[in-house]
Amino acid sequence: EGAALLAGLHRTDPPFRLPDQGGRHRLTRSLESLMHARIRTSEARFLVKLGTLLAERAAAESTDRPRLVHGDWHLGQMGCCRRTNQWRLIDIDDLGLGDPAWDLGRPAGFWAAGLLGDDAWDQFLNNYREEGGPGVPVGGDSWRSLDLPARCAVFVAATRLVLEPDVAGDGDVRALLAQSQPGPGNLYPTYSIIYAQGECPGPLYLVEFGTVHICLLTSNGRRQITSFCYAGDIFGLED
């Protein structure tokens, strides 16, 4: 039901001009709240770095044809009408124009974090496609459209535990915070390739020490260094 409702919303032409909305705006608000809170824990400091990187990447992406989006969709944003026994989208305070893939970011992020089963995610995504949802390609790899929205949705949810300690008992929120923190370290030899241009997105990386070169392979086969990452920097969202 949720997939069908979202697909129907995303296919609908807006009846009048609406403000820009969607996951990018929620990301910005969460990051600003975290920075203004001035919480000095290691989790908060890392989340600020991560949120800044995600916000820069989100700002660099453009939506050629914005669609009608819910702006804050999850399974709790559905209600069943007793009179018609039909499900409806609710809490449309963030309704506006944006990239429909960002409405799929939360279930995609929960699935990537291991909090949503493969069968449930596959059914949701397949139903969304069957209903003509424009947020992902009709066939092929959907994750190139969902990777950034999913990462941002996990970041937004994880900041809840840092900003609202009273939700510490929420297992899902704590699990998302854990997913947003650095994992075990790896030591890479000098001049080794961590990942190659064109590979599917994987984990983000936090530089503990040393220097990482971000390179671009040009059409004539030459390697062009586009940026450097030093201790404390995060990378892994490059195309």
Image: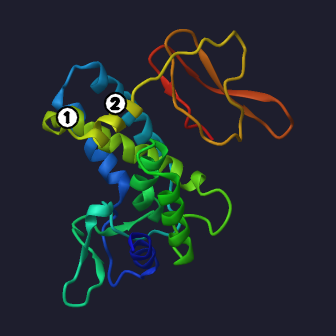
- The image quadrant where one finds the C terminus is top right
Depth order, front residue of 41/123: 123
Depth order, front residue of 61/236: 236
| Residue at x 55% of width, y 68% of height | 126
Amino acid type, label 2 = Leu
Residue 47, image x and y in percent? 34, 30
Residue bearing the label numbered 1: 168
- Mark 1 Cα shell of 10 Å, populated few (<14), some (14-19), many (≥20): few
Rendered position, 189 above or below 157: above
Left or right of residue 223, residue 155 in this image: left
Residue 211, image x and y in percent? 58, 13
Left or right of residue 174, residue 8 in this image: right
- Mark 2 Cα shell of 10 Å, populated few (<14), some (14-19), many (≥20): many
Residue bearing the label numbered 2: 47
| Residue at x 19% of width, y 85% of height | 82
- The image quadrant where one finds the N terminus is bottom left
| Residue at x 30% of width, y 60% of height | 72
